Image: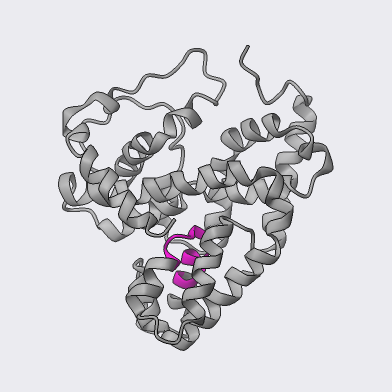
Amino acid sequence: MTMTATENKSSTELRDQYLAMLEDIAKELDGNTIFPVCFDASIQIGAAMKDPNASIQKIAHEVEKDPLITTKLLKLANSVSYNPSGRTIVNIENAVTRLGLGVARSAALACAMDQLSRSAQLAPFEAQSKLWWQHSLKTAVIARVLCKQLAPRLNPDLAFLAGLVHDLGAFFMLDRAGRNPELLERPKTVEYLVAQWHDSIGTVLLDTLSLPEDIIDAVRDNDLPRPPTTQLRRLTDVIYVANLFAGGLDEINKQDLPEPFIPTELNDPQYTDLSHEMNEAYQEMLGVF
């Protein structure tokens, strides 16, 4: 029998936990929001930051494996201090160039080290976190492929960033669950809570982290069923299809739908013909992992 998120909790208790997470985000509006994403990624980023011979390209490649560190570097690069012209950048390599290697190294290393120091509390949900991380990376690279091949009028760097951060709320929730003794005893409940709440939590979080409105709009409601997407006209269309091909159907079907959702996009030749390119891009992104 399929388990639902409410089997172990009353609706009132669940709502209270949801509101508590929103309050946690509100308390961190000073920009110091830190939570672990992937232990292995933090290690690799830390190593790259400490390597005096690492190129901008190498640093960018490692940084963009972590949604939170990527977001923080972009936020810093687009701040008034480093961006007096007001021209927003969404490419991590350009962000590193704008900040300078010294500032970029210090900011990324500090965040990675802070993530590592908090990883112990995430240990009970490490498997879940790793799956969400892999899904985020895969969505990002597929979104870039879809843009380049089927939506040339859209920015592939913006699509990559949107795909990378589209489930950022999931990592925040897992971090909070790791601090809750009651939830530590109910991993299946946590799995469903994350699937059902991470989208709305993530929207608040992305706004807190000052991501462009285009990104926030593009990732909103991506885990809800839609009519068939036959053309990629908007960034949200790209992220929705990328999410499906990265395994997001499992998230959609955890939304307590009246019946399983079967998206036609997964059998649409215009998308399936790109499967090999999608998988190659993902494997290249994983690198040493």
Q: Residue at x 65, y 65 (%)?
A: 116
Q: Is residue 4 left or right of residue 130?
A: right
Location of residue 114 (image quadrant): bottom right
Q: Position of residue 217 (x, y in %)?
A: 41, 48
Q: Is residue 34 above or below residue 282?
A: below
- Which quarter shows the N terminus? top right
Q: Residue at x 50, y 69 (%)?
A: 45
State yes or no: residue 33 in magenta.
no
Residue 87 at least partly seen: no
State yes or no: residue 71 in magenta.
yes
- Of the pair 103 and 38, the residue shown nearer to us: 38
Q: Is residue 82 above or below residue 161?
A: below
- Which quarter shows the C terminus? bottom left
Q: Residue at x 39, y 81 (%)?
A: 54
- Of the pair 149 and 27, the residue shown nearer to us: 149
Q: Is residue 141 above or below residue 47?
A: above
Q: Residue at x 70, y 34 (%)?
A: 187
Q: Position of residue 239 (x, y in %)?
A: 35, 43
Location of residue 255 (image quadrant): top right
Q: Is residue 114 left or right of residue 103?
A: right
The segment highlighted magenta reads: 63-74
Tally the marks.
0
Q: Position of residue 218 (x, y in %)?
A: 38, 47
Farthest-out residue, right? 181
Name the main secondary structure of what is drawn in magenta: helix
Q: Is residue 246 left or right of residue 165?
A: left
Farthest-out residue, front? 288
Q: Position of residue 173 (x, y in %)?
A: 65, 46
Residue 242 at least partly seen: yes
